[in-house]
Amino acid sequence: AQKVTQAQTEISVVEKEDVTLDCVYETRDTTYYLFWYKQPPSGELVFLIRRNSFDEQNEISGRYSWNFQKSTSSFNFTITASQVVDSAVYFCALSEASNFGNEKLTFGTGTRLTIIP
Amino acid sequence: EPEVTQTPSHQVTQMGQEVILRCVPISNHLYFYWYRQILGQKVEFLVSFYNNEISEKSEIFDDQFSVERPDGSNFTLKIRSTKLEDSAMYFCASRRPNQPQHFGDGTRLSIL
């Protein structure tokens, strides 16, 4: 069975600091996808990134970067020079490709990030 | 940019009543999903739908729940006889093959 653990329930940092959100996953599949979604106070789920299990290259998108390490089953998310607008709940999620076409998402419990002005 | 649209944004219903939550997925998407999020908790998978049939459902998706794609655009979730514990935010999502799921803004369901 697949499982996603986000051990950090809440994090608060002062604006402009860097912050890393941790995500550890469990799966028996060799092919899977990892995701990060952002849920701002308005409640919607905003897609941030999808990473294939065969692609361990780190990715950077503006102030956001992701570190995928298969050896430790982790997919951590770093925000550089944080801004107040980054305040949200961030969910890490996993889908297994073995169930062809379905790819349901299993979410972690989320990390509430508060950026203090 | 095309979006997944959910209506209503907030639904208040008496316990025991039937409720239908509506979703319009993105038009060229083939896979459809419902998830729910009880207040303050994680997002949980309910059901996935492809080629006009359910492809997988979770333990939460019991006989009180059903899904339908009555025409080429709508995707509905029906709860037959609502319970207090059905109060949650319900998210619809859709995707194309080999693409990530895109979520609607959710329907907040409040059972009184």
Image (cartoon, coloured by chain):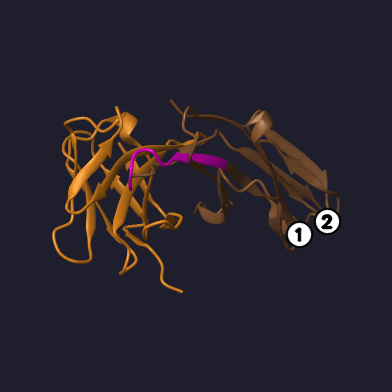
Is residue A96 in the magenta section?
A: yes
Is A56 in front, or is A39?
A: A56
When the figure is inspected, residue B103 is found, relative to residue B60, above or below; the finding is below
Q: Which residue is mark 2?
A: A81
Nearest to N terminus: mark 1 or mark 2: 1
Q: Callout 1: residue from which chain?
A: A
Answer whether residue B45 is visible to the viewer in this image. yes
Let me know if residue B4 is in the magenta part.
no
The circle drawn on residue A5 is: none
Residue at coordinates 50% horizontally, 35% vertically from top-left?
A: A30
User: What type is the residue that disc 2 sits on?
Assistant: Ala
* Left or right for A67, reference A101: right
Mark 1 is surrounded, within 10 Å at the Cα level, by few (under 14), some (14 to 19) or many (20 or more) other residues, namely few
Range of magenta residues:
A92-101
Q: Which residue is mark 1?
A: A63
**Quadrant of the drawing holding the C terminus of chain A:** bottom right
